[in-house]
Structures are given as C-alpha cells and as structure tokens.
Image (cartoon, helix red, strand yellow):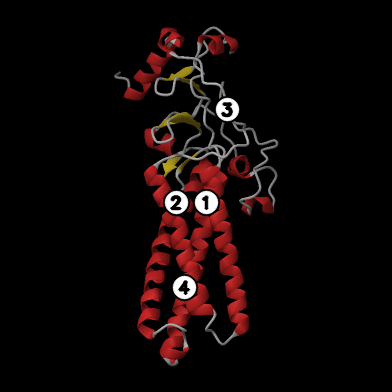
Amino acid sequence: MKSSPVSRSRDIERQAGYLRPEHCAPPPPRTHSADDMWFIRDGCGIVCGVITWLLVFYAEFVVVFVMLLPAKNVAYSLINGAVFNGLAFLALASHFRAMCTDPGAVPKGNATKEFIESLQLKPGQVVYKCPKCCSIKPDRAHHCSVCKRCIKKMDHHCPWVNNCVGENNQKYFVLFTMYIALISLHALIMVTLHFVFCFEEDWAKCSSFSPPATVILLIFLCFEGLLFLIFTAVMFGTQIHSICNDETGIEQLKKEEKRWAKRSKWMNMKVVFGHPFSLAWLSPFATPDHGKANLYQYVV
C-alpha cells in the first residue's frame, strides 16, 4: 500500500536525527513583553486592512449624511443611527483585535538541544520540528509563510485582518465577519427604504446632496453591502461549522487524521468563545476564559 505524501513527511519527522538541534541557533533574547501589540508587517495585508476600515467609514458617511440626517422622522434616524453605528463600532473593534492579537505563535528557534532535553521526552514519544522557523511544533500547529511563524490551531491566513486566524484570535475573526454581515444587511435595508421614499417624494427633498450624487452614493453602498454580506455571511458560516466540528480549515484541506478526542459541538464553541456561555461571547473586548473547556484532548 503506497503511503501518502503527508504520511511520508510524518515518517521522516519521527526519526530523531531529523530534528538536528545543532542546526538551530538559540532563540534571540526577548526585548518585548507579552503585553506588546502583535502586528504583521505585510504590505498586502496592511493595504487590505486599511481598505476594510475605509469601506466601513464610507458606509458610515452614506448612512448618516445621505440617509439618516435628511430624514423627517427623528425616531427613525435615531434608532437606525444607534444600531448601525453600534454594530460598525463592534465590527471595527473585532477587526482590530483579530489583527493585533497573537494568533498562537510558537516561540521561534526553540528547537535547540537544551530545549529538547528539557522536554524530558519518553521513549518513542514523537515531536515535530519546523525546518522553516526552527521551532518544535505542537500538535495541530502549522507554519504560515506570511507570518513566518508556526501558529497553533491555524485555520488560515486572512489578508483582510493582516493576520493568521488561530487559537487565540479566532473568536475576534468570527465576530468581525458576523458584525460586518449585520451592518451590510442593515445598510441594504435602509438603502431600499430610502429609494422607495425618494421615488414617492421629490428627490431634492430626500437628501442634502444633488439627486445624481445621491443615486451614485446609494448604488455604490448597495454594491458594497451586497458583496460584503455574501462574503462575510459565508465566511461566518464556514467558521462556525469548523469550530463545531473541531477541525481547522487547513486540517480539512489536507484531510489530516483526527487524533484528538471528540467533544460536543457546544463544548467546541466554548473552547473558542469562552467558558461558560455569557454575553461576553459577543464582545470583542472580552478575552475568552476557557475554564473547563480543555483546548487539547487527544486519543491515546
């Protein structure tokens, strides 16, 4: 029976000589604390992140200055303004946390002889070394060529948040997709209502801008809202499905064998969003408290 490329790779990594700790220089001394901000200096990711914020600000501008402020119904403007701005704030806060939170990076260059000896490995126990960043890879960790680090439970690298989605920031990424989908849906509903109102009334009275400018601004917002609603809703559903099944995007793509114990879908949600269930699940400012939700349970 012919083994797959993945199994051949693992067989090579099982050989003790493959670790070659003498090829790894000691990791550089840490010059920053654990509280320092995590940020990936990737040109494409930075541009995508800036575009994301600019698109949200554009939607804010059109919603507030084109649709809500000129509206005659004060209650309609206040309620929709509060809801839209609140969701937009949560979306940007979630984006910031997803972008500036360490996704679960493995210490770089720790595959040294001293560190391997300190692990006190049992006979036959398997450890994996990443030849790219010279670190001992924990189970379910994968190397990201953009972050240039091994990331624990890496799902994928997302240029829109300029970061990997991994063990420590998946909650914020899921919240980002959810809140963007909600503000996109809200914007589309308001645009539809505004078009209906303007067709029934005089176009000059339904906006402080000229009719042609108003139409162009609304059409662009409609296109933006529809595009992002579809994209983020699909991404949100995909992420929730992956969390419930306790299988990352890379593990699904590579069809890796599940060696970890099966948990209930509800417990898998608690692993990502925190234990126990609370309104903090919806807050990008609350760091997940895993509590009794064990991150790694493996089948022996």
Determine which residue is flagged by label 2: 49
Q: Is residue 86 left or right of residue 45?
A: right
Could you say which is closer to the camera, residue 142 or residue 103? 103
Q: Residues within 10 Å of mark 3 (few under 14, many from 20)?
A: few
Q: Nearer the viewer, mark 3 or mark 2?
A: 3
Badge 1 amino acid? His
Could you say which is closer to the camera, residue 47 or residue 136? 47
- Work out whether mark 2 precedes mark 1 in sequence or the reverse, and give the earlier one: 2
Spatial separation of the CA atoms under disc 3 and disc 4: 45 Å
Determine which residue is flagged by label 4: 62
- Tell me where residue 279 appears, x and y as whole percent: 68, 54
Residue at x-position 48% and y-position 64%: 57
The label on residue 95 is 1
Q: Is the Cβ of the residue at disc 1 closer than 8 Å to that at disc 4?
A: no
Instruction: Indicate whether 185 appears above or below 190.
Output: above
- Work out whether mark 3 precedes mark 4 in sequence or the reverse, and give the earlier one: 3
Spatial separation of the CA atoms under disc 1 and disc 4: 21 Å
Spatial separation of the CA atoms under disc 2 and disc 1: 9 Å
Q: Quadrant of the N terminus?
A: top left
Asked where in the image residue 231 lies, by quadrant, the reply is bottom left
- Tell me where residue 129 appears, x and y as whole percent: 45, 18
Q: Is residue 234 visible?
A: no
Determine which residue is flagged by label 3: 31
Q: Is the Cβ of the residue at disc 3 closer than 8 Å to that at disc 4?
A: no
Badge 4 amino acid? Val
- Work out whether mark 2 precedes mark 4 in sequence or the reverse, and give the earlier one: 2
